[in-house]
Amino acid sequence: METLKLGFIGAGFVANFHATALKQVRGADLAGVYALKGAEELAKSATASGLGDCKVYPNVAELCKNCDAVAVLAPNFARIELVEQIVEAVKAGAALKGVICEKPLGRTVAEAKRLVAFAKEVKLPTAYFENQIHMKAVKNALAQLAPQQRVMGPIALARSAEEHAGPHEPWFWDPTQQGGGVLSDMGCHSIAVSWFVLTPIGKPVTFLKPVSINAETSLLKWGRPKYRKELLDRMGVDYGKTPAEDFCTGIVTFRNPDTGQLVKAQFTNSWMYDKQGLRLLMDGLGPGYAFEVNSLKSPLEVFIADVAAEAVADAETALEKATASRGLLAVQPNEPDLYGYVDELEDARGAFLAGKDAFLNWEYGLEITRLVQAGYLSAERQKSIDLADPAVQQELDSYTSLIAQGKGAEILCK
């Protein structure tokens, strides 16, 4: 079996999560890491885990020279500069087979379009990492219901929620660096997976045409004085000055171009879910059939009494974003596989070795960015946004939300 030598740009939480997932992917090694911090630790861990001889490289150019493909897993605000460096490395002779970008592709439509143009400039195959579309639970549900879809008609309503108690790193909380709040961070997941679920069997992922979006953004927990202080003390981010939304919800309407049928995608996301940990909740409703996914339903439960709780050093050993180390805990034995990380890595490996884009490419990531930004526009104007209007699309090309500009207090703190 041919092996893909993968390089990581970034060594933070998501890079380490992908490294854990990579242990379950045949024919792929983590060959190198470049990061401003954490690279030595990640490389040492990867080598010890049997992911190949992982080396730390001093810059993007050297990483690209010594890997078959690279994954951009660095913070959102660094994406443009890093992909520019990848393109320069390819022009200088680096024989890359592909480039990966973790969601979201861009903080704005303009940024996402630049990244798409960079990759096309050097004819580099791309993979947009949206893990939830690759979840086995979602794919198996759709496969199981394929006969029903063909006989009864496709799914008409998809609902998706991703919620937890808040991000790990300070830059995620800073809307000027991250590109917004929870809508930018996690709404991209929920919109994408709902669009995918609604798509008729056998059709491309962008087959359904976006018609409109109606969204709301709110600051429900982290704008309160007590929690503002906690956030400032813990992360150094002042939501009294530059807040981002910690809750969003909305509906995207799509049209089937073959039949004219309208279908709906409902999304809800929050950074104020103070329960077991990260929760992914999805369902799809069709005529005469339905499915539901809940990531907190685990085959494994653990109970820890108060007297024994001091022995637990890290609550997240049970579940990502877990906030409790005692009581009845939901424990997922294989989170990277549950969330789709293993399958998206396998997909990228196979695609790049075949000389083509992954199932989800950067053009698809651009469309998700466009929908997320239209959601912010809808929330600002407090009305539905017509996604079929050319004038709206032109406006989105240069749009930066008030929240991303650091002006969230104008709409969140009224």
Image (tube, rainbow, N blue to C red):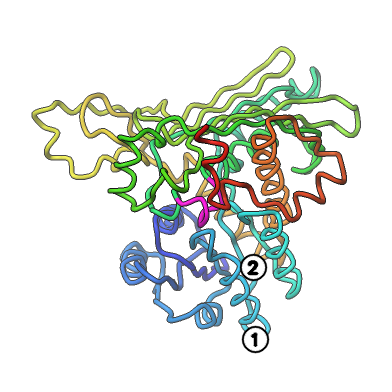
In primary-sequence order, the first of circles 1 and 2 is 1
At x 34% / y 35%, what residue is drawn?
225
Residue lying farthest to the left in this orientation:
307
The residue indicated by pointer 1 is: 93
Residue 347: give x, y in percent of width and height: 61, 54
The dot on residue 244 is: none
Residue 84: give x, y in percent of width and height: 63, 74
129 shown above or below 349: above
Quadrant of the rendered image containing residue 354: bottom right
Residue 327: give x, y in percent of width and height: 22, 25
Question: Disc 1 residue type?
Answer: Gly
Asked if the stretch drawn in magenta spans residue 219, the answer is no
Q: Quadrant of the N terminus?
A: bottom right
Q: Secondary structure at mark 1?
A: loop
Disc 1, disc 2: CB below 8 Å? Answer: no
Local packing at callout 2 (Cα closer than 10 Å; few below 14, some 14-19, many 20+) is: many
The answer to whether residue 122 is left or right of residue 333 is right
At x 12% / y 40%, what residue is drawn?
311
The residue indicated by pointer 2 is: 98
At x 44% / y 59%, what residue is drawn?
15
158 shown above or below 352: above
Local packing at callout 1 (Cα closer than 10 Å; few below 14, some 14-19, many 20+) is: few
188 or 374, which is in the foreground?
374
Question: Disc 2 residue type?
Answer: Gly
14 shown above or below 338: below
